[in-house]
Image: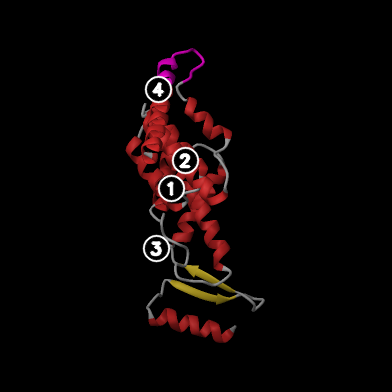
Amino acid sequence: MRQQLWVLRSWLNEHQLHEIELHECENHDSLQLEVAANVNVDVYQLHGAGRLLNLGVAIQESQLMVFEQAALLAGRELLEGNRAEWVLPERERYRDLMGSILERLIAVCQEQGCWDKAREYLQKALLLEPTRESVHYQAIDLHAKQGDFVGAIRQFERCSKALKEAFGVEPCAATKALLNFGAAPNGSGSSHQNLLEMVVQIRQTLSDLMGRLEKI
């Protein structure tokens, strides 16, 4: 342990990383890392946003920046290039936490009507985890709220394909139910529902025609 501590300290000095200090704990079987307040550590940023998620309360305007800063890290792997066995589960946990942060940001953007921002975070979330059904759900819902029924159907098809190829399963009932987004309790969405059904029928007809043409 003392030898490794010396090696790490030498490396920090060589790279002039004076804001980071290593200390041997009292039991002499572990090390403690101390980082100066002016140093940004990506894992610390992510965990900071994660703690706000665990509160389970609405995000305050002052806290939103914490999530936005964490979202800038999307697409980066934890300890990229490191293939040590202990890194793999931590990397998966890191990715899952990032997905949850992006989902929360998407929801906030939808609530505020910031559609472009919501689409930006959706793209990041789906690149991060193409099989995360909850993000596909948000994407379908976003298309629906904007009246883009064709876009909603296409997103549902992408979701179905991703889940089938990865896990051999179909989207859950809640995701399928989003295709009835035009239906409203007071009947005000009936025209939207009729348009949706028409789009589905047209797409099915075109698919059938293409299948017949291929056999000719």
User: SS for tag 1?
Assistant: helix
Of residues 12 and 120, the one drawn nearer to the viewer in this rendering: 120
User: What residue would you read off at disc 4?
Assistant: 198
Taking 60 as reference, is 197 above or below it?
A: above
| Residue depth check, mark 1 versus mark 4: number of the one nearer the observer | 4
User: What residue would you read off at disc 2?
Assistant: 136
| Residue depth check, mark 3 versus mark 4: number of the one nearer the observer | 4
Taking 153 as reference, is 166 above or below it?
A: below
Amino acid, disc 4: Met
Reading the chain from its start, which is encountered first: label 1 or label 4? 1
Instruction: Give me the C-alpha separation between circle 2 and circle 1.
Output: 8 Å
Reading the chain from its start, which is encountered first: label 2 or label 1? 1
Q: Position of residue 33 (x, y in %)?
A: 52, 70
User: SS for tag 4?
Assistant: helix
Q: Are marks 4 and 2 in contact (CB under 8 Å)?
A: no
User: What residue would you read off at disc 3?
Assistant: 38
Q: Are marks 2 and 1 in contact (CB under 8 Å)?
A: yes
Q: Which mark is residue 126?
A: 1
* Extent of the magenta region: 183-196
Amino acid, disc 2: His
Reading the chain from its start, which is encountered first: label 3 or label 4? 3
Amino acid, disc 3: Asn
Instruction: Give me the C-alpha separation between circle 3 and circle 2.
Output: 37 Å
